[in-house]
């Protein structure tokens, strides 16, 4: 019986750590820093929300200072066509275009110990130059600064 109870507790904690669901769009707003200080990808996100309008300012890893990707309009998505985005936004997308590549970010809230404390960004980079580099995906986790 103790093993079953312990399994239930561990399962609930695990769900609390990695669960994603709807959130108020305002919970995306703020300054977010990558939890991996050694990332080679996106280092900082600054998300501004006004109503259902979204602006995302991103920085990527460069040396000696991070590269400013700029401020770009993002788009929020709800769980269905009649959703109230302010109350049920699930994901934000944004596209950054450079002369050599396009980068698509999909940004979701992830629960961290039963609270909305993290963002997870899936980052898809597609090279548009003739370099022959492979398009790739990266997943980054951010905490509020």
Image (spheres, grey):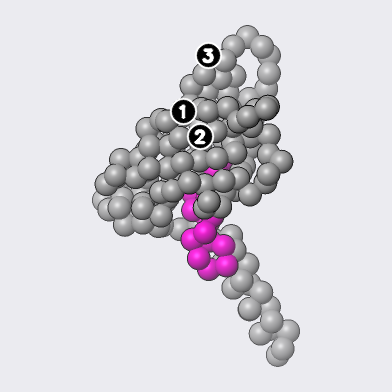
- The residue carrying mark 3 is 99
Inter-mark Cα distance, 1 to 3 = 14 Å
Q: Is residue 126 magenta?
A: no
Q: What residue is at 67 percent from the left and 27 percent from the top?
A: 64
Q: What residue is at 63 percent from the left and 25 percent from the top?
A: 135
| 6, above or below 97, in the image | below
User: At which x and y percent is residue 3?
Assistant: 73, 84
Mark 1 Cα-neighbour bin, 10 Å: few <14, some 14–19, many ≥20: few
Q: Which mark is residue 58?
A: 2
Inter-mark Cα distance, 1 to 2 = 6 Å
Q: What residue is at 38 percent from the left and 43 percent from the top?
A: 48
Q: Nearer the viewer, residue 64 or 16?
A: 64
Does residue 15 appear in this view?
A: no
Circle 2/circle 3 CB separation < 8 Å? no
Read off the magenta span: 108-122
**Dominant SS type (magenta):** strand
Secondary structure of the residue carrying numbered label 2:
strand
Secondary structure of the residue carrying numbered label 3:
loop
User: At which x and y percent is residue 115?
Assistant: 50, 65
Q: What residue is at 55 percent from the left and 33 percent from the top?
A: 59
């Amino acid at each position: 019986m103790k093993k079953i109870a312990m399994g239930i507790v561990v399962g609930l904690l695990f769900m609390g750590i990695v669960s994603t669901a709807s959130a108020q769009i305002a919970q995306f707003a703020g300054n977010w820093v990558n939890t991996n200080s050694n990332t080679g990808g996106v280092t900082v996100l600054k998300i501004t929300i006004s109503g259902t309008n979204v602006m995302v300012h991103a920085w990527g890893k460069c040396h000696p200072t991070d590269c400013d990707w700029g401020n770009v309009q993002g788009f929020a998505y709800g769980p269905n066509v009649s959703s109230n985005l302010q109350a049920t936004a699930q994901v934000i997308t944004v596209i950054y275009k450079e002369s050599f590549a396009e980068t698509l970010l999909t940004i979701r809230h992830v629960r961290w110990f039963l609270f909305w404390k993290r963002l997870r960004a899936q980052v898809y980079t597609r090279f548009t130059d003739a370099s022959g580099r492979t398009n790739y995906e990266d997943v980054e986790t951010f905490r509020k600064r």
